[in-house]
Amino acid sequence: MFKRSFAVTFVVLFATVFAQSQMTVTGTAVDVVDGKTVVIELPNGKVRAEMMYIEVPEKTQELHETVIDHLRKLVVGRPVTFRGKQLLGNRTAGLLMIGEVDVAQQMLRDGAAWHVRHINTGQDEAEARTYETNESDARSETRGVWSIEGMKTAWQ
């Protein structure tokens, strides 16, 4: 029990320090929790990393499982870099990268997510334009969430 308690305490402490300092860590993506949250294994434990600036289909929506499978294929088993920006309970939100690829942008480009506009999130304007371009390209090609007529965004 002590080992488990220590591990949980370490992860919470690490996540708090990580989020406050906007640290960047590199590890291996080992699991996908939902369509925008990944578990990253680090040398000293694991961290739940949620991608900022996107939303994905909820459990009750079409494509929910498809999006989770898509993210799993993109990241699991691969080295990732994560820059935490915000602590959200039991996970940290930030930017998830595979090499030079922003995974959230890739999810938008593939039609697996919707962009949460920078007005609501504080996202940098230039970065928001790039996200919007990726989303727009997926929409014009009717990919993923854009292929289902009348599908509402997760926040609707």
Image (tube, grey):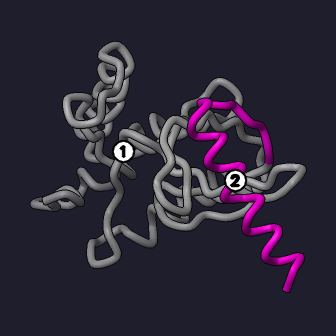
The answer for how far apart the CA atoms under marks 1 and 2 are is 26 Å
Q: Residue at x 38, y 69 (%)?
A: 64
What residue did someone put label 1 on? 54
Residue 77 is labelled as none
**Where is 84 relative to 114, above or below?**
above
The quarter of the picture where the N terminus appears is: bottom right
Query: Foreground mark, 1 or 2?
Result: 2
Q: Which SS type dominates the magenta stretch? A: helix
1 and 2 marks in contact (CB < 8 Å): no
**Where is 20 relative to 93, above or below?**
above
Indicate whether residue 8 is drawn in magenta: yes
Q: Tell me the SS state at disc 1.
A: strand
The quarter of the picture where the C terminus appears is: bottom left
Q: Residue at x 35, y 19 (%)?
A: 124
Q: Quadrant of residue 102?
A: top right
Say how many tags the image has: 2
Indicate whether residue 116 is drawn in magenta: no
Q: Nearer the viewer, residue 63 or 120?
A: 120
Specify which label sits upstream in the sequence, 1 or 2. Answer: 2
Q: Residue at x 40, y 37 (%)?
A: 109
Q: Amino acid at mark 2?
A: Leu
What residue did someone put label 2 on? 13
Q: Bounds of the magenta span?
A: 1-27
Q: Residue at x 79, y 44 (%)?
A: 27
Q: Quadrant of residue 83?
A: top right
